Amino acid sequence: MQLTINSLSKTYANGVRALSDVSLTIPHGLFGLLGPNGAGKSSLMRTIATLQEADSGSIFLDGLDVLRQKTELRQMLGYLPQEFGVYPKITAERLLDHIAQLKGVGNPAERKALVGYLLESVNLAQDRKKHLGTFSGGMKQRFGIAQALIGNPKLLIVDEPTAGLDPAERNRFYNLLSQLGEQTIVLLSTHIVEDVSTLCANFAIISQGKVLYAGEPDKAVRQMEGTIFTKAISRQDLSGYLNKMSVISTQLKSGRLHIRVREERAPGDGFVSAAPNLEDVYFSHIVNENAMIAT
């Protein structure tokens, strides 16, 4: 199964161009959509989920025309938006049973078995009788995945699922998403580079509504080998380096400012070679895009 997006564009009524000629091929498994807040990720997710219309372009899930066959797409879609509400005084078991009814699971015995299976799958079986208002952020996200899995979706969309989670909850969520990626297409939207480097075999970088890069994380990192250099500098010297070098990121460590630059040759001047990582790939594309906009 494959999701194919061709020349997708969307401009809102206020003139904001959310998507600009977006084309992507998304295979079976986990695919990361990486970009800063406001990059167009959520707009793309909502368009794929048939929650908003596109101005132009096409989306196909194998032979299914997503933009024209909305009902058919919704029958095979699981969706976990960035923010979703729960009834705080209803138990996880009861609300999941209600959602299953809304999704067409009419047989009570079948529904009970399904709810039990899903709660077990997301490690919430022991919390089935607890009110959702008592759940932690990570537990709510796992509940969100459970409701998205009703109907055995062929396409699962999760928008910023790990934002705000503590390290332990994020780890548990990574394990869950990895398991789901073995069974279906999982489209993961995030601004957290670690999410993509940990989970995804393929990814794309999106900014200002445009796809800046698409490929495999490991390959993207290898392509930058020998071009990343780092140095500790004084804060007052930063503007000088920004003017003369390709600075892709800065980080304050123990009171000193460390900069990472991308150069085809060793720049000297106290810079040392550094092993590239996916953050370097991400920041280099975002920096280049912002530079082009500024000029």
Image (cartoon, helix red, strand yellow):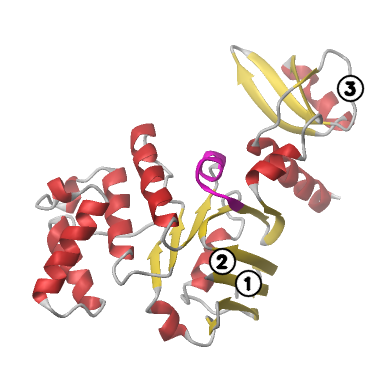
Residue 201: in magenta span = yes
Q: Does residue 173 appear left or right of residue 254 in this picture?
A: left
Q: Is the Cβ of the residue at disc 2 closer than 8 Å to that at disc 1?
A: yes
Q: Position of residue 222 (x, y in %)?
A: 73, 38
Which amino acid type corresponds to the residue marked 1 in the rendered image? Ile
Give residue 101's quadrant in the image: bottom left
Give the mark nearer the N terminus: 1 vs 3: 1
CA gap between label 2 and label 1 equals 10 Å
Give residue 58's quadrant in the image: bottom right
Label 2 environment density (alpha carbons within 10 Å; few <14, some 14–19, many ≥20): many
Query: Residue visible at 68% across and 18% down?
Result: 257
Numbered mark located on residue 44 in the image: 2
Q: Is residue 102 visible?
A: yes
The magenta stretch spans which residues?
193-202
Label 3 environment density (alpha carbons within 10 Å; few <14, some 14–19, many ≥20): some
* SS for dot 2: helix
Q: Position of residue 80 (x, y in %)?
A: 38, 61
